Amino acid sequence: MASVTLDKINKVFGRDHIIKGIDLSIGDGEFVVFVGPSGCGKSTLLRLIAGLESITEGELRIAGDVVNDLPPRERGVGMVFQSYALYPHMTVYENMAFGLKLAKEGSETIKERVMATARILQLEDLLHRKPKALSGGQRQRVAMGRAMAREPRILLFDEPLSNLDASLRVQMRNEIARLHQRLGSTVIYVTHDQVEAMTLADKIVVLRNGSIEQVGSPQELYQRPATRFVAGFIGSPTMNFMPAELLGGDAEGCRVSAPGLGKLALPQDANGQGAGAKLTLGVRPEHLRLAEAEGNNRFEIVNVEYLGNEVYVYLEPKAGDTLLIHRSEAPSHWSIGQRVALVPDLEHVHLFDAHDRALGIAKRSRAA
């Protein structure tokens, strides 16, 4: 186990500035997930920590020691790749023992570590098999075991579940979470799947275009996104966004107008913006209630998705080109073609300024 500190880390490939001044502290034993869209730099950042890529500028410290110039084998990290990277001609035991042999460990030490790791991952009955005789989930466990057997200070995962089917991904998420609880190791995990991030992480790092957009717990990012990008990326279905106009504000909050919702009194601080400022209003599908249509504030239902325990209702927006989504528990009496009114839960409405930054909660700011 070890802490990891990234101090103004930059990575440049030719003319492309991929990682841009990353500052981040990862505590000893934390489970941290790097998440973001394709091309945001999350896998590159993981490879910089592993030592598979060189750092252009900045300082990387593991357990307080600067490791910029150390090769991967001397950093005390174990890495699990998306492709498993198992040797097809070797048995499970030989695959798990390979890194220890390269490190010139004794045969007794190798056997002891491989068997201990196999017990943790429930691979004891599979040690004689070769990868082609294993399922996808079993191969992933072997890849994890190969990294764990070296007893690294830090475990790195690079999208390890993306090759698995949906049900197996759920099973492996649970296994990885239980593994972390048993070992207490420091884990850095890369994924493009925000569901994996939300279910596994102690702390999520949201990356965008090579920079950190926000860092926080899953609850913090879901309930208090710092930017519109984070609000739209974290959460499934995604947050609903609508254009809004600031009518005025004071110490208690602000008043806005939004197409189809009318005038709303919200607890957000207007942050010194004047009346007429253009804002974006965001509300999650579960915080949007449907009601019988009254007057002109009506939206048409264009689709209803029944998912067993819940229902998604899609509505034609008053402004913008993205459908709005309402989520509720099943059953639902709403149907395609109905016209309804939308009633947002005012305590769970988010506001973003013209630069897509979230407006803070006025009452919370005063209490703090």
Image (cartoon, rainbow, N blue to C red):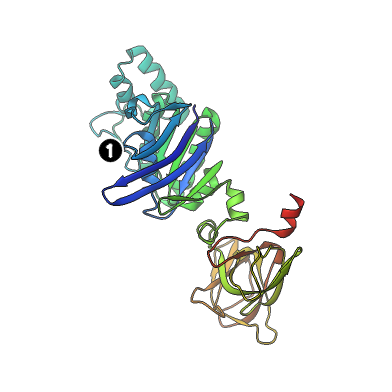
Q: Amino acid at mark 1?
A: Lys
Location of residue 282 in the rendering, given as x and y in whole percent from the top left corner: 59, 66
In this rendering, the answer to whether 64 lies above or below 285 is above
Residue nearer the viewer, 137 or 13: 13
Horizontal arrangement in the rendering, residue 307 relative to residue 10 (left or right): right
* Count of marks, rendered view: 1
Residue nearer the viewer, 187 or 113: 187
Identify the residue at image location x=49%, y=27%: 2
Horizontal arrangement in the rendering, residue 198 relative to residue 138 (left or right): right
**Residue 140 visible from this viewpoint:** no
Residue 279 figure quarter: bottom right
Location of residue 23 in the rendering, given as x and y in whole percent from the top left corner: 48, 42
Identify the residue at image location x=36%, y=17%: 110
In this rendering, the answer to whether 329 lies above or below 122 is below
Residue 94 figure quarter: top left
Identify the residue at image location x=44%, y=50%: 211
**Residue 105 visible from this viewpoint:** yes
Residue nearer the viewer, 134 or 248: 248
Location of residue 9 in the rendering, given as x and y in whole percent from the top left corner: 41, 41
User: According to the image, label 1 marks what residue?
Assistant: 132
Name the residue at the left extreme. 89
In this rendering, the answer to whether 303 lies above or below 135 is below
Residue nearer the viewer, 174 or 255: 255
Identify the residue at image location x=63%, y=83%: 298
Q: Secondary structure at mark 1?
A: helix
Location of residue 241 in the rendering, given as x and y in whole percent from the top left corner: 56, 69
Mark 1 surroundings within 10 Å by alpha-carbon count, few (fewer than 14), some (14 through 19), many (20 or more): few
